[in-house]
Image: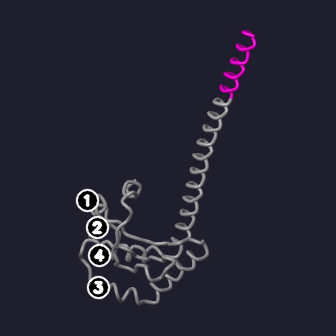
Amino acid sequence: TMKKNTNSKLTLKMIAGFIILGLAIITVACVTGYNEFKNDIKQQYNDEAYGIAHSAAGLVDSDTAKLLGQIAKDRSNGDFDQAVIDEIIASDEYQKIRGGFLNLRENMGANDIYLVYCNLDILNDYQGTKEGWTPFTYIFDCYADEEYSYVLGDQGPINPDFIEPTTE
């Protein structure tokens, strides 16, 4: 009976060992699978974002892009004429381009498509609160809910978690 007890104990230890080994393998497989899934989703999201950006670039000719970018930069630096900004926003050309952005957003199923000037001095001066911190000056914003869309010259913050990726 002594040999039988030893065999039983050894069998139980082996079974427990196999269970622990199985759990360890399952845990590693789950963590690895999750990380691969997360990376695949991130890559898919980035690829789609770059595709949208490439399509959006075709909606604005280079001269208009330079002009709107300069106006947003001047606005960001406090050197702007609101009457000029209002005139551009009301223009057929601005509205046509904005309409193209809206159509692109709808066709791509995106929640928001925007074009901004990012003031890096303001971006890098983040002090822990978004109040009064506006590194983005909008050129176009085509948020799904029009009530929350920005137009040329509007300023806003970004999620502070994205400061480093924005400057890379």
Residue 133 numbered mark, or none: 2
Q: Compared to 39, does 120 lie above or below?
A: below
- Dot placed on the residue nearer the N-terminal end, 1 or 3: 3
Which residue sits at x=40%, y=78%? Answer: 150
Q: Are marks 4 and 3 in contact (CB under 8 Å)?
A: no
Which type of secondary structure does the marked residue at label 4 adopt?
helix
- Dot placed on the residue nearer the N-terminal end, 4 or 1: 4
Quick one: label 3, few (<14), some, or many (20+) residues within 10 Å? few
Specify the segment rendered in magenta: 1-18
Q: Circle 4 sits on which residue?
A: 75
Q: Circle 1 sits on which residue?
A: 127
Q: Single out the mark in the foreground, 1 or 3.
A: 1
Q: Amino acid at mark 4?
A: Arg
Quick one: label 2, few (<14), some, or many (20+) residues within 10 Å? some
Residue 87 appears in which quarter of the rendering? bottom left
Q: Are marks 1 and 2 in contact (CB under 8 Å)?
A: yes
Q: Are marks 3 and 2 in contact (CB under 8 Å)?
A: no
Q: Amino acid at mark 1?
A: Gln
Query: CA separation, marks 3 and 2?
Result: 20 Å
Location of the N terminus by quadrant is: top right
Q: Amino acid at mark 2?
A: Trp
Q: Single out the mark in the foreground, 4 or 2.
A: 2
